[in-house]
Amino acid sequence: MSAAGDPVAVRVFVPGQPIPMPSRHPVPDLLAARRVLAIQPHYDDNDIGAGGTLALLVATGAEVVYCTVTDDLVGVVDDTLDATAAAAALRRDQAAAGQAIGVSRQVRLGYPDAGAWDRFAVRADLLRVIREVRPDAIFTVDPWLPTEAHRDHRETGLVAAEAAILFGLPRLPGSDPGVDAAWVADRGPDLRYVAFYHAGVANTIVNIDATWERKAAAVSEYRAQFEPHELPMLVDALDERAQAVARLAGEGFSGRRAEGLRVLHPGALHGGA
Ligand SMILES: [Zn+2]
């Protein structure tokens, strides 16, 4: 027990009031990215979660590549379609939505939607994709959203975040030795940041007024996964949310609609740095 006047060795704070620890990494500049890889569990997550921001990056000259982890077949509403026809319908939707956003390329990993996929197999594929695309920014779902119940979302966000901090280690193989060898010879730019959408805690609010129509058009293309009457309801719900997020940004923020992201330097994704 310390006596009066002793230096304080331990200070206990009020239970239930956690103290955020400082990070030595400043919040990265979102719009500085030139090549973006957006990794999503299902075909529509990037557009629903960050379509306005991704379209804005395209407008500033960035190249945007999408990578979808699962085959998304569970979400197809027309149960008369066989797997081949359902996959074709999803690809059509994604191509049309990608055109609205300005996506340059779609990479599909094809793991079973809501199924038993192995995180290490997905990680090896993501190492391959990251080493091939050589992005300076990665977008993905926030795996730390406290109420996220969908395993595909939690696992995709976690595996993508882990791949983002490990892809620079050449001893860790990706799923294609040829890609690994080419990447070792020419590694491309440093990764500036990982941006998490569907974020539980945001540190960046993005004005998407200029690209809202593109996001709405992209989301409206997901006809295989939503009944016709559901799509306008989804767009309305996203509109309402975008306006609520813009209001959160407070005074001086000019946007009417916004997306909230948690943008982290890769160094902030390991060891409390
Ligand atoms: Zn999803």
Image: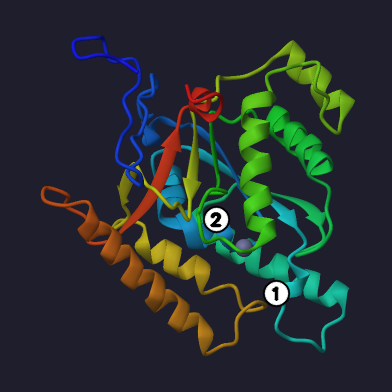
Report the side of 72 relative to 243 (left or right): right
Up/down of 195 relative to 225, above or below: above
Q: Quadrant of residue 187?
A: top right
Up/down of 69 relative to 137, above or below: below
Instruction: Report x, y in % for residue 95.
Output: 64, 62
Q: Amino acid at mark 2?
A: Asn
What is the crowding at mark 1: few (fewer than 14 residues within 10 Å), some, or many (at least 20)?
some
Q: CA distance from mark 1 to mark 2?
A: 16 Å
Q: Nearer the viewer, residue 72 or 228?
A: 72
Q: Is residue 67 visible?
A: no
- Which residue corresponds to the image point at 49% horizontal and 45% vertical from the top-left? 196
- Which residue corresponds to the image point at 36% horizontal and 55% vertical from the top-left? 259
Q: Nearer the viewer, residue 114 or 52?
A: 114
Q: Nearer the viewer, residue 129 or 152?
A: 152
Instruction: Report x, y in % for residue 255.
Output: 22, 55
Q: Quadrant of residue 225?
A: bottom right
Q: Say if disc 1 is inside 8 Å of ligand 1.
A: yes
Instruction: Report x, y in % for residue 266.
Output: 53, 27
Instruction: Label 1: state its secondary structure.
Output: helix
Instruction: Report x, y in % for residue 101.
Output: 49, 56
What is the crowding at mark 2: few (fewer than 14 residues within 10 Å), some, or many (at least 20)?
many
- Which residue corresponds to the image point at 44% horizontal and 83% vertical from the top-left? 233
Q: Nearer the viewer, residue 57 or 175?
A: 175
Q: Quadrant of ligand 1?
A: bottom right
Instruction: Label 2: state its secondary structure.
Output: helix
Q: Are marks 1 and 2 in contact (CB under 8 Å)?
A: no
Which residue is labeled 2 in the image? 46
- Which residue corresponds to the image point at 60% horizontal and 73% vertical from the top-left? 222
Display coloring: rainbow
Which residue is labeled 1 in the image? 75
